[in-house]
Image (cartoon, rainbow, N blue to C red):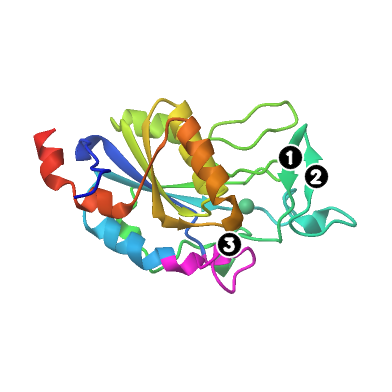
């Protein structure tokens, strides 16, 4: 039996599936390492019915978005610049609104999503987290409305998975914890842009109070759930 047995009320738990879009997979503009490997396990995990609510996030940039290296003369993708006083990684053009590779991956059971939160729509601000944009020129991180949506639906526990491990899933989980949700990070259902960042990602999440688990810890837990 796993040492990570997970106890939660399914009716008060939401699964957030972050940015499972072809541009973050092999052959896409901004591929995570083996990004496509999460699709089938997330499909099975969703169809297992552990949660009361399923929400997807979708990176959704206008053409010419400020996070694109192509908008910054003399810069290359993956360089880091200062933007409004914070580090900004410059990315290849990706997840442009309406493009095929910006769609949610059709290998997911899309009908199970009660809501899809699009993010990164402000041309001048990036957005890694499903909860809030990155910092804008005023030093604020405007919310997407996701926290309020989850609270109105009675959600207390948030489980996160998707792409990429070291950026959008990490930031989403950190913000979920900051918003007061009990937050779980499904490590095996993520893949990184930079696999060398794994140790730093684990430490940052743990420091925020996020519980790092594997999907099997949830699958192994129905008896514990009903007893809790
Ligand atoms: Zn993006």
Which type of secondary structure does the marked residue at label 2 adopt?
strand
Q: Residues within 10 Å of mark 1 (few under 14, many from 20)?
A: few
Q: Which mark is residue 81?
A: 2
Q: Was residue 35 drawn as part of the magenta stretch in this picture?
A: yes
Q: Which mark is residue 199?
A: none
In the foreground, 16 or 61: 16
Q: What residue does disc 1 label? A: 87
Establish if 104 lies above or below 207.
below
> Residue 225's image quarter?
top left
Q: What residue does disc 3 label? A: 98
Task: Identify the mark nearer the N-term, 3 or 1.
Answer: 1
Tell me: 179 left or right of 195: left
Task: Identify the mark nearer the N-term, 3 or 2.
Answer: 2
Estimate the x, y position of residue 151 in percent, counting from the top left. 35, 28
Q: Which residues are magenta?
A: 22-37
Taking the spot 58% from the left edge, 62% from the top edge, the residue there is 98
Estimate the x, y position of residue 164 in percent, counting from the top left. 53, 54
Alpha carbon distance from label 2 to label 1: 6 Å
> Residue 51's image quarter?
top left
């Amino acid at each position: 039996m796993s040492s990570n047995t997970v106890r939660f009320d399914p009716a008060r738990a939401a699964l957030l599936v972050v940015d499972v879009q072809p541009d973050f997979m092999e052959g896409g503009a901004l591929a995570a390492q083996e990004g496509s490997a999460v699709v089938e396990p997330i499909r099975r995990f969703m169809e297992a019915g552990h949660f009361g609510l399923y929400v997807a996030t979708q990176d959704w940039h206008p053409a010419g978005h400020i996070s694109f290296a192509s908008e910054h003369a003399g810069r290359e993708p993956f360089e880091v610049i200062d933007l409004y006083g914070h580090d900004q990684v410059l990315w290849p053009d990706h997840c442009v609104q309406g493009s095929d590779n910006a769609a949610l991956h059709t290998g997911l059971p899309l009908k199970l999503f009660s809501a899809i939160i699009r993010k990164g729509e402000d041309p001048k601000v990036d957005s890694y987290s499903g909860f809030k944009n990155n910092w804008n020129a005023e030093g604020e991180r405007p919310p997407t409305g996701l926290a309020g949506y989850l609270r109105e639906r009675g959600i207390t526990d948030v489980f996160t998975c998707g792409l990429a491990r070291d950026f959008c899933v990490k930031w989403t989980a950190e913000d979920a914890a900051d918003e007061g949700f009990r937050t779980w990070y499904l490590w095996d259902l993520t893949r990184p842009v930079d696999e060398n960042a794994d140790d730093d990602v684990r430490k940052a999440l743990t420091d925020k109070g996020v519980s790092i688990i594997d999907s099997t810890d949830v699958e192994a837990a129905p008896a514990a759930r009903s007893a809790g």
